[in-house]
Image (cartoon, rainbow, N blue to C red):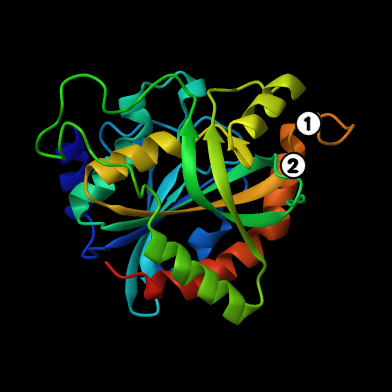
Amino acid sequence: MISEAAAWIAARTKLRPRVAVVLGSGLGGFADELMGREEFPYASIPNWPASTAVGHAGKLVLGLLGTLEAAVMSGRVHLYEGYTPAQVVFGVRVLGTLGVRAVVFTNAAGGINLAFERGALALISDHINLQGANPLAGANADALGPRFPDMTEAYSAAYRATAKQVARELGIRLGEGVYAAVLGPSYETPAEIRYLRAIGADMVGMSTAPEVIAANHMGVRCLGISCVTNMAAGILPSKINHEEVLETGAAVRGTLAKLLKALLPRLEV
């Protein structure tokens, strides 16, 4: 299934990107930064699951950032949509099969660390997978990677250092913290947020961890950037809604796009 989708894409473009970006809720605007764009709706790609979440465009975009060939997944699928772990990581596995060796994962996250505020951008230094599933469970796909992949550096330290340097050059404030991945789709309770803070989480969301596991399995280096679109339950007296998430994502989209445009060409692959 993965090879069929990869072959379908390869037959329809001359581009062979080695760097890719996965865009989270409300963050899809970066795809428009690519020149000479070639767009493939997920529904048109064999076996590729369709994104149903609001704020996810649901298309693969290939194009150029200067001379750099890049791929952008504008939207992703989640376990809470009813998809299997294998379906959730399908796009990342296809990109890896096409030759992508570096992926920047972005997401919308709730802020747990009180040092963060709504609209902040934060690097993911590590994650805690609380989704109750792992995309590598079951028979190992030996052609993709080893049975027991190491996750000591799930998010490349070298990439994080480069991202910090680029952010400093651009005058962009860039935090850093641990991302807790939960199943969703309900937002967390205040008690759950207190628990997540106690175990070391700085932000929380419903994506990214499965994809990063699958990417590391394939030997693809990862960078994660969360947009803190809201403060988590119990941090502020107000309630949480998805409209707020999308609104904040739209507000920081330009800053994120500026960071990614400068960062991607400097990632060593």
The outermost residue toward the right is 237
User: Which residue does the numbered mark 1 point to in the structure image?
Assistant: 240
Q: As drawn, is 240 to the left or to the right of 178?
A: right
- The kind of residue on which mark 2 rests is Asn
The outermost residue toward the left is 143
Residue in the image at 15% along x and 40% along y: 144
Q: Please provide percent x and percent y for residue 154.
A: 37, 47
Identify the element where label 2 is drawn: strand
Q: Please provide percent x and percent y for residue 264.
A: 42, 69
Check the picture and name the quadrant holding the N terminus.
top left
Q: As drawn, is 146 to the left or to the right of 81?
A: left
Residue in the image at 73% along x and 54% along y: 119
- Of callouts 1 and 2, which one flags the residue occurring earlier in the amino acid sequence? 2
Identify the element where label 1 is drawn: loop
Residue in the image at 70% along x and 56% along y: 120
Q: Please provide percent x and percent y for residue 153.
A: 35, 50
- The kind of residue on which mark 1 rests is Ile
User: Which residue does the numbered mark 2 point to in the structure image?
Assistant: 230
Question: How many neighbours does mark 2 have within 10 angstroms: few (below 14), some (14-19), or many (20 or more)?
Answer: many
Is residue 37 in sight in this rendering? no
> Tags 1 and 2 in contact by the CB under 8 Å rule?
yes
